[in-house]
Image (cartoon, rainbow, N blue to C red):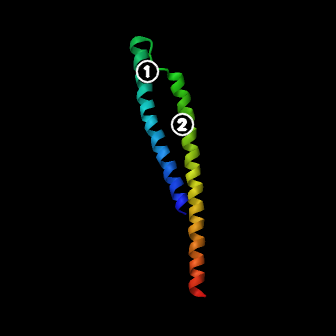
Amino acid sequence: MLEIFKQISIANKEIKELENWFLNYDMQSHQYQRDIRAKGKSDIDITTLDSEAYKNAARIKELRADIENKQKELSEQMKNASTSLFAKRTS
């Protein structure tokens, strides 16, 4: 069970890091738009950023699905442990 908690914690940490990346992405994409409006060009490589955003969004989705599966697995293990403990007490 402890291993599942660790895996969930690691996945949540990665999600937080990716969410922080998206905050930076939003700032850079807004700056890109301001540059285009003001100067007609920008030094920001928006194509690369957009590509990374798609990959990072997919990774977040994958991590959330993994967390959901791990939580179900953990719930099942806890249920089995509880049932086993109850059976020992009643025998």
The kind of residue tagged 2 is Asn
Please state which of the two labelled residues, at mark 1 or mark 2, is closer to the viewer: 2
Q: Which residue is mark 2?
A: 56
Q: Is residue 21 above or below residue 64?
A: above
Q: Residue furthest bottom?
A: 91
Residue at coordinates 56% horizontally, 64% vertically from top-left?
A: 75
Q: Return the residue nearer the eye: 79 or 26.
A: 79
Q: Quick one: quadrant of the N terminus? A: bottom right
Q: Return the residue nearer the eye: 85 or 32.
A: 85
Residue 74 image point, x, y percent: 56, 62
Residue at coordinates 45% horizontally, 13% vertically from top-left?
A: 41
Q: Return the residue nearer the eye: 59 or 7.
A: 7
Q: Is residue 38 above or below residue 52?
A: above
Q: Quick one: quadrant of the C terminus? A: bottom right
Residue at coordinates 49% horizontally, 53% vertically from top-left?
A: 9
Count of residue discs: 2
Residue at coordinates 48% horizontally, 39% vertically from top-left?
A: 18
Instruction: Tell me the CA gap for discs 1 and 2.
Output: 21 Å
Residue 56 image point, x, y percent: 54, 36
Q: Is residue 11 above or below residue 85?
A: above
Q: Using a 10 Å C-alpha cutoff, classify the residue at mark 1 as few (fewer than 14 neighbours), some (14 to 19) or many (20 or more).
A: some
Is label 1 in a helix, a strand or a loop?
helix
Residue 29 image point, x, y percent: 45, 26
- Horizontally, is 40 left or right of 72 in the view? left
Residue 15 image point, x, y percent: 49, 44
Is label 2 in a helix, a strand or a loop?
helix
Q: Are marks 1 and 2 in contact (CB under 8 Å)?
A: no
Q: Using a 10 Å C-alpha cutoff, classify the residue at mark 2 as few (fewer than 14 neighbours), some (14 to 19) or many (20 or more).
A: some
Q: Which residue is mark 1?
A: 33
Q: Residue furthest front?
A: 3
